Amino acid sequence: MKMLPTMFKRKTISGLVGLLCIGAACAEAPAPTATSNQLVLESNTMDLKADPCTDFFEYANGTWLKNNPIPADRSRYSAYDEVTERNLAALKQIAETAAAGEIKTYNGQLVGNFYASGMNEARIEKEGVTPLRPEFEKINSIKDKQQLVAVIADLHKQGVGALFGFDVEQDAKNATRYIPQLMQGGLGLPDRDYYLKTDAKTVDIRHKYVDYVAHLFVLTGDKPEEAQQHAQTVLAIETRLAKASLTKVQLRDPQASYHLMTVDGLKKVDHFTPWTAYFNEVGLTQPGQLNVAHPQFIAEAGRMINTVSLDQWKTYLRWHLTNTYAGDLSSDFVNAHFDFYGKTLAGTKELQPRWKRVLAKIDVDAGEALGELYVAKFFSPEAKAGVLEMVNNIKEAMRESIGKLEWMSDTTKKQAYKKLDTVMVKIGYPDVWRDYSALHIDNGSYAANVARANAFEFQRVLAKLGKPIDRNEWGMTPQTVNAYYNPTMNEIVFPAGILQPPLYHVNADPAANYGNTGATIGHELTHAFDDEGSQFDEQGNLKSWWTAQDQKQFLARVKTIEQQFDEFNPIDQLHINGKLTAGENIADLGGMKIALQALRTSLKTKPQAAEIDGLTPEQRFFVANGQSFRSLIRDESLRLQLATNPHAPDKYRVIAPLANMPEFSEAFNCKGDRSPLRHGGKQVVIW
């Protein structure tokens, strides 16, 4: 349920290591297909004593909220997490069968070996930090800037996001080709603001971060006194990088992250970094044109390479290597990593059991190998056909919605239709599976397997350069409980994992399916026309297709939804950031409106029961949508979400759209003061 910006579609080496995505829209877990005929609408989760007009979230979910405390090993608990828990057991069964040698395919053996190595606690404990020693030696042997940059490049190849980010993705303004991308990165805290804000909670987190960094240095062999000094060095370097970084809101503007140039142009931006040494080490002797996404950051990184001492750089690189692999090492590293990223930042009480963590790692590092085994057992052709029918109906509803827009001219509508008609739809799993034959995974060292998987992925991505765009590539694994829109591909993608009960059921009441999965489809489709996606044309190019007047009208309407969410205050004095969450909020509202329209059209040709559980089809639509966002979240995790996540907390993703939908008030007969509708020109009308 998110838009994946072109440069961040996959796991890249830039960004924070070790944090879990937050919010129902970010939950990623597999779910086996149920075979019962139960309805998606779950009346036993509702609180019928609540007034749907004034407290709809409680009305749709109240009983569930009372009866489902957050498990100790989670920072939040939601409908998506329910699916996660049920289906992790299914993936475990697959992995254990593979580890026993009972799946004879190459992917079966790969998954089996990866799982077996991850579950071999005795060996992992015995190895300790030994798997990282060769890289420590490389870092300690750095004698000049040339070697420093070569080692940074070597770390990038192993998935360590030191100093800056490197990736290969589509050229945002010429989406028919791949180009190298350089971007900001190199931080250990979730966002630049964690280094710069001075409120008490942020300062406390920084202190605990320094303690964590020092603890990891002690675990690698430093004395406590020098570990504290090294931790301060790391904080100083990362703080300087943070000051040069764009904010989360600034990163939402694709134009702000596009600066096409040659290597000569890069050397003018940053004339301190020996870029030839970097590109030679990553295996790119002729980079050609590249996108320097964040020139001011790259320039500052270069100045730091010129002024920060080599000993300080060695400290910083040793830290990032250790932090990246901490979760794959012995329990002292794992526990230290969890204590900070899990407990301090997210409020999680207990570490997840090893088998869950190993499955999560396999999903990241060899996800399609696991996914091929998953869909063979847990995804039906009927589910795919049912979802495709909904997609087609919702696309038609979107066309009708565009046609009725009073604020958009016929000239812009023509271009919008063109983009809508070229949206590619992917459902379930890839038509062409990823080839892992070059990835060696054995049942020996777990950390070594992870390192080889990281190196494999780096080389796989690097090999895209000079080749045609791979239209069969997926940015999520089939078992992922999520969906996405990719603007440079102009595609909406729905993995098998999200097309599972209670989120979708082939035999369910259509009103409930449209309210849940239908709204998700509408959400992803609307991302093509939100404040980010609308900047890309039908070919996936960052190119305006709007008239100036229509764009002015559109941005004025976007501002109204930003202002609506700015008003929400979920905890402490922390408000939702309307600009940060605008794209997802536009998609939530647009998705619900066009899914409801598609349901109404469907009911004309396929009438359904007038009432089920005492609810009309439109009431069931809204309840199903509300139930899809049922969740509880720990305070720490909520604060983290508000600071870093482009999705608003789940409760507000339910109640905010209803304040802009007269259809809801009509369905539940909400009149006068009981109506949640915004008035006085505040009601949001976009798509």
Image (cartoon, rainbow, N blue to C red):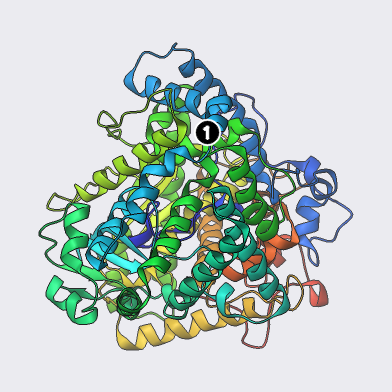
Relative image position of residue 44 (x, y in whole percent): 80, 40
Relative image position of residue 536 (x, y in whole percent): 30, 69
Tag 1 secondary structure: helix
Relative image position of residue 286 (x, y in whole percent): 10, 60
- Left or right? Give the position of 52 relative to 381: right
List the single residue furthest toward the right: 49
**Depth order, front residue of 282/359:** 282
Relative image position of residue 330 (x, y in whole percent): 57, 37
List the single residue furthest toward the top: 102
Q: How many marks?
A: 1
The type of residue carrying mark 1 is Leu
Quarter of the view holding residue 606: top right
- Left or right? Give the position of 112 relative to 346: left
**Residue beneath the point at 50% across and 33% down:** 127
Residue 509 sits above or below residue 299 on the image: above
> From this viewpoint, is residue 479 visible?
no
**Residue beneath the point at 41% across and 45% down:** 476
**Which residue position holds label 1?**
359
**Depth order, front residue of 588/145:** 145
- Left or right? Give the position of 582 relative to 372: right
Disc 1: CA contacts within 10 A as few (<14), some (14-19) or many (>=20): many
> From this viewpoint, is residue 471 visible?
yes
**Depth order, front residue of 501/514:** 501
**Depth order, front residue of 333/327:** 333
**Residue beneath the point at 32% across and 77% down:** 255
**Residue beneath the point at 36% across and 83% down:** 550
